[in-house]
Amino acid sequence: MVAIDDHCAIATRMSRQGLRGGIGDIAAVVRSLVGMQSQEFGYALWSVAQRTAPGSDASHQVSKATMDTAFADGVLVRTHVLRLTWHFALPEDIRWLLRLTVPRLKKLSAYYDRQLGLDDAVFARTNAVLADAVSDGRHRTRAELSAVLDAAGIPASGQRAGNIMMRAEFDEVLISGAPRGKQHTYAAFDERVPPDAGFDADESLAELARRFFTTRGPATVKDLATWASLTLSQARRGLAQVESELDSATLDGATVYLAAGALDAPRGEIDSPTVDLVQGYDEIVMSYSESRGLLAGGAAYSPIAISSPYLHTILVDGILVGHWRHRLGPDFAVIETALRRPLNRRENSALLASVRWYGEYLGVPATLG
């Protein structure tokens, strides 16, 4: 089995995830990556958009306005799946992703549900009320749905409302709707998701493993299990079905899997240094647990600290060097940074180029604050 070094692994991940060379249109990006963490909604739209552009060619990147329209139209949807947090996925993938991962997610949320006085009998009532509230194409905000539940004699405020809505997502009652101004809404699940085509657990495990390793590789089985809230047994079962389609290698003593031929394929190399402004929950960060430390440019198992309130991640040639956030006005964007080390002249020039690219996505001039 071939051994690969950190530089090769980082370059391959950046390429396979579309941060070098792009992937395609909005649907192609989300289909390829299966699920993309999205609780930081505005920044998460950027995670999709920056993968539509080849290299750093912003002329091929979709704009924020285009991303907003795609989300409102349901090209991509947003729900709690894979882990107990929001993810983007394609409507055509949501049913099997939910059915594969929800059994574990329900177990993970059960303690908090009990603390809030929520059980299966209560959820049966809340699901029925919520289904009626969003019927006939009505998209409702969380506040509106909470008021409907309260009117039905079911207290629904604070975290209790959040767990009730999440259970309705798990049970295929609610899915993201079209935003109303700056407010998110929920829609009826069957309104935005294609009809049920049946579910096969082994086929779904295989598909999830196939897409994970071909886009996140080189990655370990534990990386897959943690990312998708699977047991290690489930992750290994998924891998076993597609292992013949993949290549394997060793990285820092661990066995990793990746798309066949990925180590020999062009990796969309662009001039070094290249700076990427990625959101803090971008898939280049969140797809890895066991092998996450590559981001730090050090030992493979070192932790990556997130520096609040600068939540988002600055990468130089795929290695974490600091964090960022944006400050937006009606006709400007200011990018504020917190660096772990000073940047040299060439790195700083690359950072400025990335800031300009982000501004082009937003449709306003962007400057470094």
Image (cartoon, rainbow, N blue to C red):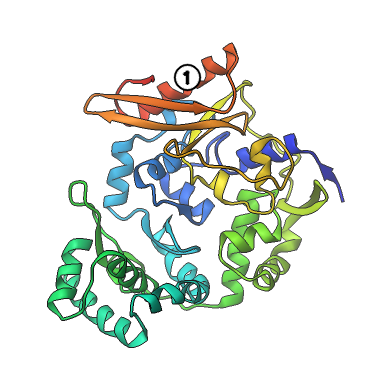
Of 35 and 80, the residue lying toward us: 80
How far across and how far down the image is residue 185, in percent?
23, 58
Name the spot of residue 105 as percent of width and height, x first. Answer: 48, 71
Place residue 95 in its image quadrant: bottom left
Residue 137 visible in the current orientation: no
Q: Position of residue 159 (x, y in %)?
A: 31, 65
Vertical placement of residue 126 versus 137, above or below: below
Query: Picture coordinates of residue 63 (x, y %)?
Result: 34, 34
Asked if one can make out residue 80 in the rendered structure from this viewpoint, the answer is: yes
Name the residue beneath numbered marker 1: 353
**Regarding mark 1 in the picture, which secondary structure is present there?**
helix
- Residue 48 picture quarter: top left
* Residue at x 58%, y 34% (from the top left corner): 20
Query: On screen, 184 above or below 341?
Result: below
Q: Is residue 95 above or below residue 22?
A: below
- In the image shown, does 58 or 354 lie closer to the viewer? 354
Q: Disc 1 residue type?
A: Ala
